[in-house]
Image (cartoon, rainbow, N blue to C red):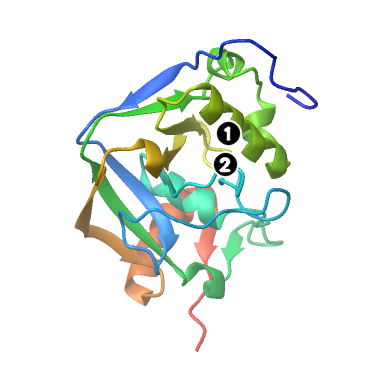
Amino acid sequence: MVGQLPPQDAVMTPVVTVVRAGTVVWRCHEEQYAPAEFNPSVAHEFFKGSRFDPTEKDPYPYLYAALDPVTALSEVLLRSVEFSDGSGVRQIPWAQASRYVLSAVRTTADLTLVDLTTAEGLAAVWQDGWLIDTDDYAGTRYWVRVIRERDSAVQGLWWTSKRCRPRPALQLFQDRCPAAPLDPRPQDRLRLASKQDARRVNKLLAPLHAVISAQEE
């Protein structure tokens, strides 16, 4: 909610979704990270970064994921990519895509996430659709800090993907998760720098009118 400050002296009781142990989730991550590795970096409080990244005021390793590979790809590769004239297809630059890997991992424990997919879930954390739709990432990062401060038990976030509606996306807080909460699935891994794997990814992206451009020579 634009301009809303957290209510003073109010008790926050988030609506939660539990991702059960044994659930397969998908990540689109830079190749420098292992499939189950959390990102230790923090975003600037006001500039760059992603919607729910931690900042120096509340640093913790984190990990973005989704329940299906298309949503995981969309959340990373389809940011601000325009539909081309003539073809009507979104061209994802090879130089951008080739840094990433699509990996599947399996949860090893039940994980309790703040549910932001409904009006009720958003209202429970004193917010509305602004939190998951705005491009004011300084504001959304601040609000995650508020949620973490008001509820020390939640282990991450669960919201509706902006780029692959109505499918859910999620973020895990490593400092709230048990040790080794994710088990890699090496058989489910695609390197976008590989021509063969990029072709498989393009088949996944085709219904969204998106394609990774031809490999640069």
- Mark whose residue sits in front, 2 or 1: 1
Lower sequence index among marks 2 and 1: 2
Give percent across and percent down for residue 128. 66, 21
Q: Real-space Cα distance between discs 2 and 1?
A: 6 Å
Q: Which residue is mark 2?
A: 52
Residue under the point 58% across and 34% down: 145
Q: Is residue 135 visible?
A: no
Q: Quadrant of residue 16?
A: top left
Q: Is residue 130 visible?
A: yes
Looking at the image, residue 186 sits to the left or right of residue 192; the answer is left
Number of dots carrying numbers: 2
In the rendered view, tell whether residue 147 sits above or below residue 217. above
Give percent across and percent down for residue 104. 29, 51
Q: Amino acid at mark 1?
A: Val
**Disc 2 and disc 1 in contact, CB within 8 angstroms:** yes
Looking at the image, residue 188 sits to the left or right of residue 140; the answer is left
Residue under the point 27% across and 38% down: 178
In the rendered view, tell whether residue 86 sits above or below residue 9. below
Q: Residue furthest bottom?
A: 217
Q: Which residue is mark 1?
A: 144
Looking at the image, residue 142 sits to the left or right of residue 31; the answer is right
Q: Residues within 10 Å of mark 1 (few under 14, many from 20)?
A: many
The foreground one among 191 and 171 is 171
Give percent across and percent down for residue 188. 24, 56
Name the element at disc 1.
helix
The foreground one among 122 and 59 is 59
